[in-house]
Structure formats: structure tokens, C-alpha cells
Image (cartoon, coloured by chain):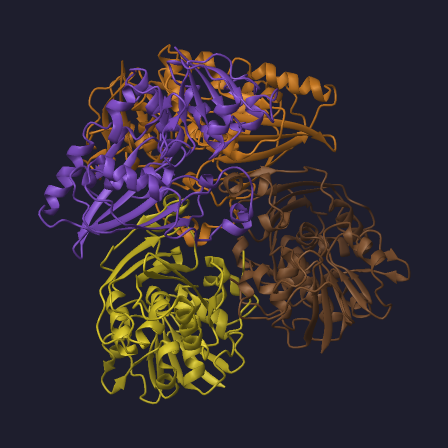
Chain colours: A yellow, B orange, C brown, D purple
Amino acid sequence: MINVSIAGGTGYTAGELLRILLRHPEVNIESVISTTSAGMPVGEMHRDLLGETDMVFSDSFGNPDLIFLCLGHGLSRTFLKENNVPASCRIIDLGNDFRNEPNFGEREFVFGLCELNRERIRKAANVANPGCFATTIMLALLPLAANNLLTDEIHVHAITGSTGAGKRPGETTHFSYRDNNISVYKPFTHQHLTEIANTLTSAGNNTTPQINFVPMRGDFTRGIFASVYTKGDGELSASEMIELYKAFYAPSPFVFVSDKPISLKEVVNSNKGLLHIEFHNGYIHITSIIDNLVKGASGQAVQNMNLMYGLEETTGLKLKGSAF
Amino acid sequence: MINVSIAGGTGYTAGELLRILLRHPEVNIESVISTTSAGMPVGEMHRDLLGETDMVFSDSFGNPDLIFLCLGHGLSRTFLKENNVPASCRIIDLGNDFRNEPNFGEREFVFGLCELNRERIRKAANVANPGCFATTIMLALLPLAANNLLTDEIHVHAITGSTGAGKRPGETTHFSYRDNNISVYKPFTHQHLTEIANTLTSAGNNTTPQINFVPMRGDFTRGIFASVYTKGDGELSASEMIELYKAFYAPSPFVFVSDKPISLKEVVNSNKGLLHIEFHNGYIHITSIIDNLVKGASGQAVQNMNLMYGLEETTGLKLKGSAF
Amino acid sequence: MINVSIAGGTGYTAGELLRILLRHPEVNIESVISTTSAGMPVGEMHRDLLGETDMVFSDSFGNPDLIFLCLGHGLSRTFLKENNVPASCRIIDLGNDFRNEPNFGEREFVFGLCELNRERIRKAANVANPGCFATTIMLALLPLAANNLLTDEIHVHAITGSTGAGKRPGETTHFSYRDNNISVYKPFTHQHLTEIANTLTSAGNNTTPQINFVPMRGDFTRGIFASVYTKGDGELSASEMIELYKAFYAPSPFVFVSDKPISLKEVVNSNKGLLHIEFHNGYIHITSIIDNLVKGASGQAVQNMNLMYGLEETTGLKLKGSAF
Amino acid sequence: MINVSIAGGTGYTAGELLRILLRHPEVNIESVISTTSAGMPVGEMHRDLLGETDMVFSDSFGNPDLIFLCLGHGLSRTFLKENNVPASCRIIDLGNDFRNEPNFGEREFVFGLCELNRERIRKAANVANPGCFATTIMLALLPLAANNLLTDEIHVHAITGSTGAGKRPGETTHFSYRDNNISVYKPFTHQHLTEIANTLTSAGNNTTPQINFVPMRGDFTRGIFASVYTKGDGELSASEMIELYKAFYAPSPFVFVSDKPISLKEVVNSNKGLLHIEFHNGYIHITSIIDNLVKGASGQAVQNMNLMYGLEETTGLKLKGSAF
């Protein structure tokens, strides 16, 4: 059994991690840390867990084999500075602190995109879990990058559910605002752009392509739908291109290429990523979907843990989708 | 022209009042008051008003003929204590301060349920606008009360949109919580119960019936759907009862009895109230729907203003519904 | 391994059954029957199953140990008449054909409400799976019925998601109609009333209480929220009553009494039932929630199968909820 | 008074037209035509009109000054062939029959984009009302086209509400499918592309730009949100470009440029178009929003009628938005 603790236990990604880990056959949850809610039953905060756990939030992380950091962006470094985490304790960070700057003291964080870094993750002591938008977009582009086929700028619109904005209520997550509403935010300037560009070059693309990325706020709770297109390189036919995608993802148990158009709910509440590919106007057009809280955060973190501990990659992650 | 000011100008009911009054042919808006946002253009707060007004929030109410108070419950009395409103200035209060305790100094507030108090409102200097749940439920019961037919307890479930909870974001108005969710709050203890009971007796019912009222939070933004049943008195046939309802509401230009079952969106974004009546198990079952921000708040307030100033009751209120 | 077939394989409950059974460690799915879609890959119809199964719809049920009938109400008897199902093959019917009339030839169907009939189900060859509204309401009332405490009429409002209406598109499941809308249907006359009343007397209540049941259509996809109240018998205190509920459900691994108010999404995508109990106006007020497709249909069917085959009742049913 | 008839009276755009025209001070509705529902009260089909009209559907169009054709794409030519519409009767077609092929016998249809063709519409006997996606996208691009500034390809993602798909229920408008779901359809091949391209050149752009248009289905009922970018020509500064937009739309009473980012509900249930403009990566990025049923269909049709009859352009169209 892997003995784990979770820091930042009251947030959305920690809740989702708990939902998964409580059913994971190889995991014991030692501690769910919350400095503000220590002593409160976990099931009072994550109300759907009633009947599934008697744990209470703790103010110390105990002595786990692995800590998941679910702290909010920028707070993971602070946590490591303020807490004396033993060198032997592994870390999976769900924040963005170590994605682009992977070093902290002696620790080096491997970028936790399983479909790219599977072998490196198997040997990693520390993993920086990718961002949710970044995961969706990278899954759409990895096979091209790995074959150095990204030669032109990339056009991306991606629409996210409200859980991507976190638990703290605000104007744009107010139901009266968000219901039946659509908006754009941070167009062309989203913070995941660096992570995406770095990944595409580390996957094998010789140049760093320009990415024109327009993020949108959707009126749903879970999931990201990305629509991505870029000029094809012209040497591969449509069917060859699709075969290239299918071959690239053949070793990946959660990513599939659909021959038919896809809709977001086909992956909601699962750890899957689905892709669909078409060709128009000289562009290759890829639609890519994930559940932002599962494959885009806590599910991917557990997938990384499975790899780090030599477990079957899908352990605890064969989740029933909600479909509706 | 009636010269009006609006206190509490940044909230939902003030926004809705502005949407209506900016199109009202007999109204001039002198001042939209906000102590916290004075100087900000009104259209920056109520974003759908872009292109419709150049007004800015003010910190003084000027010298209007009428003030609408949109201040939140309990704050209207405070406002009147802290501001020297001339005796000649009329008041319509959209809060609950004067519904059950109608006196403030020399001022006496008439309960502004047009379908009950039309003639009193015509002569009123001050009006206490009814609550949104109360309006929906009273419209379902007024014809029975007026004929002293409420002889047994009354069973009510009513489900409200998120705008009923106001603008301040919180846990139960967070989109991630509310979307596709249903919950009950304040069962049997909602604060509108007194207002409803008082109204039914003042309408003519000899006894004060017990009301079992379960309010529900719905995952939509606008509207209240109430399902109400009570033992019929047994003397009237079904068709006589329906005729009694239709006769009662014949003078009311916004309330209609539908022969077919109704659904909430048939009144959303209008000032209408719709009722449908069936008979089962010895009960008369009435479904009643309004838009909480229009007929349940700002539209009803304008309807009261029209009556107070001798205008056609429907002036400025023939609103296009949204239907979808 | 239990070898099962599913009749009516293209509908919602069959899809949900597949989602569960594909992950069930003790089940082999022999055949998914569809007369209209035979030959089509199952994953083309139930699109979220892409990557999870290569099965195709079949026009014959093979030679299973157990058939699940997901055929729509009234069609199960027809199926059994038209198909020569061997006497040794067990049946779980998700339709309403055998709930109130449990005999068909030599077959006798046990009413499959695990929380009431657990021991009978363990020995059953045929099970009639309860209706979704009925399950929600019976869970709210079973402990009272079992103690003969239902002495007065029962008041119920319950609101259901759109998947309860099935897959065939129609006016009231059109998104343009249903989104942000609420309506009542079949008030006081819903077809589940007989099933509920029969169950309460078979549970031990000496009289058949009158049930005033107003079903509502909600603007969400999954789940039923029921609000139920009835006169308490006056002999038990509030805390004794709550203890009675908790004791009644202690042997049931999926039903819990929450000390805090509940909201629908706490059970969505799980096989759980949650109850919350308050006392007002001389009434005991119970809110009860389930996922209509899981605990209200396919999950409950699998729970019944587990009992019939001597498996742990929760096998394959420890589903991660969606929470949002 | 203008005497009008409406063909195709049971559909969504006819319903919306009725909602507007019943409140229009200069219009008399002579006939609402439905061959399938002749004799049925209009308020039974368009349920929100209860109490607002006693009209019944008719099978003949009478002798109007103007007919609105709300027939579905391709059916307007059929209607004109099968019905002997007098030459003196004007026509506004809400379908796509005459947008790109403007001639029918002696009749010539003016493309009814008021912001482009205002003066031609004033003199028109027949108007082809623009498509909803086309209107949203053209409003984003007209000022550039009119100044011959479209020199590079154009990138568009636009997401539409379910009412855009019409009233007939189907798989992708089923609530269980659509709620909380997102999908792409007809990427790069939408039928409005010709209409858009033609309009941009007729507005004054010397070349026909390539438009890469990805339409999306949103989980809301009303409105279209378009995100559009193209290379700026480099000669105008950001502020000059914004001034160019504001100057272009100064004569248009319903189109406004917002200095702040916009969200869809700011125009829902109004005849307004809102634009917001930013500059990134060498691109001008324009977001554009309308209500597809109002500015994208029936509201624009009434605006055209107002122009054709010399009325103030805004007559009957100063609609209260719903905001929430």
C-alpha cells in the first residue's frame, strides 16, 4: 500500500483526488491537510463523500510515502519552504509551481504528462502535474510535435467548465451570471501558453510554434473542449495523419481517436481524453476533450502515481463516466 | 413625467427597475444612488444597459417625486432614518421592512399587491412591495381567501431561481454547486409566511390558515414555480371554482388562468402571473408562476407606481417575454 | 463469472447498465440485444464507451445466466412471450411489468427494493426492479412503514431529471423548452403510486396511506429530489425518530441519513441514497435523493444481481460520484 | 398601420416575430399562417402569449401589405410558387432562399443587413433577412471590410444556442444530450460562409478573404458568441482601429462597441449587437454577440420593416433585455 497525504484538502482538486483514492486498491490516505478546517470531518466539506470516509482534516501531513499538493498556483513552493518534507517523501504537485521551473533544492520535478513522459515518470521522485487547458491542447498536438510536423502557427479556442475557476465564489462563477452565458478571458495571454510551448519542443518539434489561444468560460461545470487547427505539413495524407495519431496513442490506455465527431460529455467524469481529426482549407483540425478535474488534474495525478510506483497505469482509474 | 430616484442602485432589483424605467414613457430617472459605486457609469455595473443610458451612480437622491428603495431587507428603515426624505416624496419599498409593520413616522405603507389592493394603492403615498415567493403563492390563493374558502391547511412547494438570492456570491449561488442541482432551504420557516398569512386574512378569509411551505433552490436564474394545494370547501364544482378564479382576476391585466398545464418560462421576463387549476384527491391544486425579478419585484413596483400616479396599469410593462 | 445479456440495449438504462457491468469483476456480458441496431458497435450508440468495449449489438440473447430487460414499460411481457427464455435463465426486469403483478407463467418476480427485500432477493430467480420515483419516495418512508407509523396522508413533491423521460426526443425534453424551465406533470396520478402504496403495506404498515404526489420536471439530466412530509405519530421524539431511520438503514451499504441538509448532486453518478430529516408543524419532513439512472434503475439492478448471486452487495458499485 | 401576415407561424422565428409585433405601435397582424395548425389558437402553440392575443392560425394569408416568410430554408421559393402573392405585397424572407440568389420573377431581394444596406432597404420592396451566424460575424468584420482592411484569412469560432437549431426535436437538441455539453458541427463548411464572403466584398473589400469558421453547439437557448481574429493591416493603431469601429456604427442604433470584455447575456432578449476589440500577436481580435432570435432573425426583420416603411428604425424594438 502507498501511504499518501493531501495538502490543500478542501479545494476542488483535493476533493476529486479523495473520490478517486478512496476507491484505489493500493492506496492508504494518511492525512488530508487543511490549516483552516482542521478537525472538520472531510465529508462535511466534500458532501458527496458522506458514508464513504470518516476522516477529518488534519493540520499535519504525517509521514507519508507521497504528498499530493493541491494548494493553488504559487503556493506549493511556499508549502515546501514552510514544511520540512523528508527527502524520501515523493511529491506530485497539482499547481503550476514546477511545470516550467522544475527545480526546488535537491528536488527535480518531471513534467507529468504521461503520454509524453511515461518512462521518465516511472523513475521520478517528484512530478509536476500539467494544467487542465494545457493537457487538452497538448493531447491534440503531441503526435504532430513528436514528428516535428508543427511548422505553422496554431489556432486554439478552448472552453472550460466552472470548476476550472476553483471554489472561491466570484462574479464570473455566480450562477446568475454564468448560467446560459459565454465569455472570453485572457485571450492570447493565458498562463498555460509557456507550458504548452515548452512541451511541444521537448516532444520533438524543432521550432517553438506561435499559439493563438482564446480561452472561453462555458456554462457547465466539468470538462474542457478544445478546437485546434494548424497547417498540415502537406506530406502526409489525411489517413496517414490519422494513423500517426492512433499509433502515437496506442500505448496510452486513456487517450483515443474517435472516427466520429465528439461531444464533451463523452469524457466527463472519466480519465479519458478523446480526439477527433478532420482536414479542411489546408488545415488539420483536431477537437480534443477531457474532464478538467480528472484527466486535467486529479485523475492524471493518480495516473502519475501509478507509474511512479510500478502499478498498472489504469489502477483505480477505470471510472464510470456520467454520459449525461 | 414622474421624477424618480432609486436607492440601492447596484443590486439585481435596481438593475431590473432601470431596465423597465428607461423604457417607461412617463418616467424620468433623476438619480441612481449607490454609496459604494458613486461616480461609476450605471452601464458598467448593469452591463446589458450599454448604449441605453449615460447615467452614473450618485451618492444623493436629489429631489424626486418618488423613491424606489432597493436596499436589501432591513435596510429601508435605516435609509429613512439616515436621510431626510421630504414628506412630499413618495416611497415604494422593495424590501421587507414595511410589509408586516406598515408604519414609519408619519408614513403608512400600503401593501402593494395590486390584485388585492388596487384601489388603496391608487391613493397611497407609500407602498410596501410584496416578496417574490409571497406574490407567487398569494396569486394562487387570493380568490379562495377573498371568498373565505380557505378552511384547511395549505401545502406549498415553490422553487426559485438564483436571482432571488441576490448578487452577493456565496456557496449556494456558486455555479459549480448550483448547476444541475436542487436543494431545499428554510422548510416550513420561510420569512414570507407572515406576509402571506396576513394577506389572506386581509383578503377576506375569516381564519388564518396554516401554511406548510417548502422553498426549493432551482438551477435556473429567473422565476418562481409554486405548487399549492388545499382541501376545497366542497360546495363549488370544479368548473365553478375555475370561474371564480377567472372572475377574480378579470380586472387584473397581468394575471391569467391557463386551461392547460403551465411551465415557468411562459412568464419569464414578463410581468405576468399564470395559474393553472386541477382537482385531485379532494384537493384543489393550483400551480402559479411569475418572474421573481419582474412581477415578483421591479415590475410589480412599476405597476404600483402606475396606479399611484393614475396611469394605465400596464404602462411600460408590456414586456416581450423571452419564451426560451 | 456471471454470464449476462441485456435486452433493449440502446436505451438509457441499458447504457448505464453497460457502464457499470463493463467494470464489474464478476460479470461477463454475453450479448447486448437490439433488434433495430443489430450489428452496430455498442460504442457508437453509447458514445462515452469508446475505448471500453468492442461489442456490437446482437439480435439474439445467447445463452446467459441472467437477462436484464431494459425494454420500456409494458414491453417485458411481450419480450417473454416472443422469446423462449429457458427456465434456468434468471431475469431482472427494469420495466414496470412485474412490479405490481409479479407472475408470468411459472416465473414469480420479487420486488427488488434491496432495503426492504434483501433476504427474498438473495433467493430470487426473477426480480422486478423498482421505479425511480418510487425508490426515492420509498427510501424516505420505509422506516416509518416498517414500524407501522404511517397514520396520516403523505405529501410528496419530487423533481426529476430529463433522463427519466427516456431517449426518444419530444417537446418536454427539447433543450429549448427544458433549459431553465420547471413544470408539473401527472399531479396526484403518477403511475408509481400503486407500487409505492403496495410496498409500504408490505413493509409492515397496517393501513394503506393516501399519497398526494406532485411530480415535477427539472432542468437537469440526472437525479430525483423528493420532499416528503407526513404527520408523525407523536410518540417518538425527533431524536428517536432519526435513530429509528439510522437503525433501519444500518444494514444497507448505500443509504445514509445526513445530519445536514442535502443537495441532489451529493448522490449523482453514485448508487447512494441520502436522506435528511427535520420536524416542523407537527410533521416529519424527509428529503430523499438518488441518481435515477443508478440507484433508481441500473445500479439497483446490479445490486439485486449481486444479492441473487451471493456476491458482496456493493461489488462493482463503489462508483465515484461526480459531485459537480 | 402596416398590415402584415406571417407564413410558417408555428416555428421559433414566427413566435419571436409575434412577440415583437404584438407590441409594435404601427403594425396590425392580419394573419398567422399555418397549414398544419389552422384553427388552433396562436397562444396554444406559443404558450407565453397567453393573455396577449386571441388570434388563431389561418390557412390563408389574406391581403396584407407585407408578408414575413418564416418557413425554413428552401421553402420560401416554394411558397411563392404555390401562392399568388400580389406584386404590391412586400416580402421579408427570414429563410436563406434569397440571400445569395436575390431574384424571383420580378422580385429582387435586398440583403437585409441594416448596418450595411440601410439606404437600399429604405427603398426595398423585398428583403432577404441575414442568417444568425452571418449577422454576428459580419458585425465583427463590416468596418474592416468597408475600409478594405481585410487582407489576410479570418479565424472564427462561434457558439450558438439551441433555438438556432429550430423546433423539431432531435438528438443534438435533446436536453439529456445538450445540457452541460459542447460540440462542433460543420467545421469550415457552414452554409453561411457564402453569405458572409459576399457581404464583405459588397461592403467594399477588394478581395474575398478566406474564412476559417468553426461553429459550436452551446448548452444555452438564446444567443451567439463569436470570437474572430485576423491580421490587422498594420497602418492603423489600436486606438485608431477602435475609433474606426465606433464611427462606422455611430448611425446604427443597435450596435455598440464595448470598452470592456463582453458576455453573451448582455444582449440576450434584445435587438442589440455588442462588440469588443483587442489586439494581440499582430491580430485584431473581435468578440461579437447577438440574440440569434432577435437581432439574428425576427428583431432584424422588424428593423428592416421599419426602414422599408419610413418609421424610426427602433420602433417596437426597444426591448428590455433579460440580463440573467
Identified at 78% across, 71% down, the residue is C63
**Residue farthest to the right, as pictured:** C106
Which quadrant of the structure image shows residue D135? top left
Nearer to me, C92 or C139: C92
On screen, residue A66 versus residue B238, left or right, reads: left
When the figure is inspected, residue A31 is found, relative to residue D270, above or below; the finding is below
The quadrant of the image that shows the C terminus of chain A is: bottom right
**Residue farthest to the front, as pictured:** D105
Q: Position of residue D70 (x, y in %)?
A: 47, 28
Q: Position of residue B41 (x, y in %)?
A: 20, 35
Q: Can I make out residue D75 in this image?
A: yes
Which quadrant of the structure image shows residue D118? top left
Which quadrant of the structure image shows residue B23? top left
Nearer to me, A130 or B87: A130
Q: Number of numbered discs present?
A: 0
On screen, residue C96 versus residue B172, left or right, reads: right
Q: Position of residue D181 (x, y in %)?
A: 46, 53
When the figure is inspected, residue D120 is found, relative to residue A227, above or below; the finding is above
When the figure is inspected, residue D273 is found, relative to residue A221, above or below; the finding is above
Q: Can I make out residue B109 in this image?
A: no
Q: Position of residue D10 (x, y in %)?
A: 53, 28
